[in-house]
Amino acid sequence: MRGFGAAGGPGRVVAGMAVVMLALVSGCGRPPAYPEGVEITEQPGEPALEEGDDPANPEIDILAAADMAGEQVPEGVLYDIELEHGREWHVDLMVGDRSREVVIDSANGNITEGSGQGAPVSEPFDTAPPVSLEEAVDTALTETGGKLSNEANLAFEEGRTTWEVHVDDARVVSLDADSGEVVDIDG
């Protein structure tokens, strides 16, 4: 007589069928069931967008994102900030000869990522230019009549440091980072 669970015995067949039935009943391979009314709005690694959020008009603007990144890396000098896919602000700050990145959810201001020591940079600087990001953005919006700046970066060309401020995804305003003078408007 074969015992329950013996190799090839009826107990093993019954146990195997029970596992299959349990998997089918529990929804194995499907997303987990959540209580009624609970909706998952974000996937791991993706920032949350609530109903009514407009990725083209983020809750957290360029200046607020820059301030948040500065709080995370107080010794850093901001040199590049960009709204990527309308969802995340990617803010690069210079610390000595290294770049550090802070990623901020544009819908709610959560810090979603930040790099440790950062990558070496070929043209390091350790002080902010006389013209702040805020002044550069304000000037660019005023000069173009734009509503939103979604990117700004410091550029080093021909012995001059400029802020390159992108306005409404359509125009780029170049400002001398020492004087605030508008150097060029593209678009």
Image (spheres, rainbow, N blue to C red):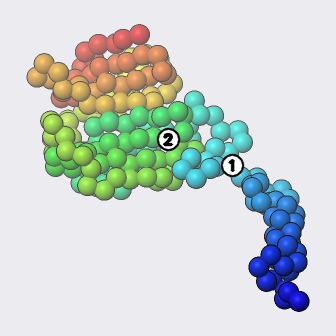
Type of the residue with mark 2: Glu
* Residue 179 seen anywhere in this rendered image of the structure: no
Q: Residue 154: x and y, percent?
A: 26, 31
Q: Which mark is residue 149?
A: none
The disc, 1 or 2, on the residue closer to the chain's N-terminal end is 1
Looking at the image, the residue that sits furthest to the front is 1
Asked if 103 appears above or below 143 in the picture, the reply is below
Amino acid on which disc 1 is placed: Thr
| Helix, strand or loop under label 2 | strand
Q: Is residue 66 above or below residue 12?
A: above
Farthest-out residue, top: 187
The residue that appears at 35% across and 30% down in the rendered structure is 152
> Between residues 139 and 1, which one lies in front from this camera angle?
1
Report the quarter where the N terminus lies.
bottom right
Q: Which mark is residue 41?
A: 1
Q: Residue, x 24% and y 20% (percent of image)? A: 181
Q: Is residue 128 above or below residue 6?
A: above
- Report the label total: 2
Q: Is residue 38 left or right of residue 174?
A: right
Quadrant the C terminus occupies: top left
Which of 22 and 184 lies nearest the eye of the viewer?
22
Q: Residue at x 37, y 36 (%)?
A: 81
Q: Is residue 10 left or right of residue 28?
A: right
Q: CA distance from mark 1 to mark 2?
A: 16 Å
Residue 66 appearing in the image? yes
Sort mark 2 into few (<14), some (14-19) or many (20+) by Cα contacts within 10 Å.
many
Q: Which residue is mark 2?
A: 88
User: Who's the residue at 88% across and 78% down the image?
Assistant: 10
Can you give x and y, in whole percent of width and height, for residue 52 in the image?
70, 38
Camera-side residue of 184 and 82: 82
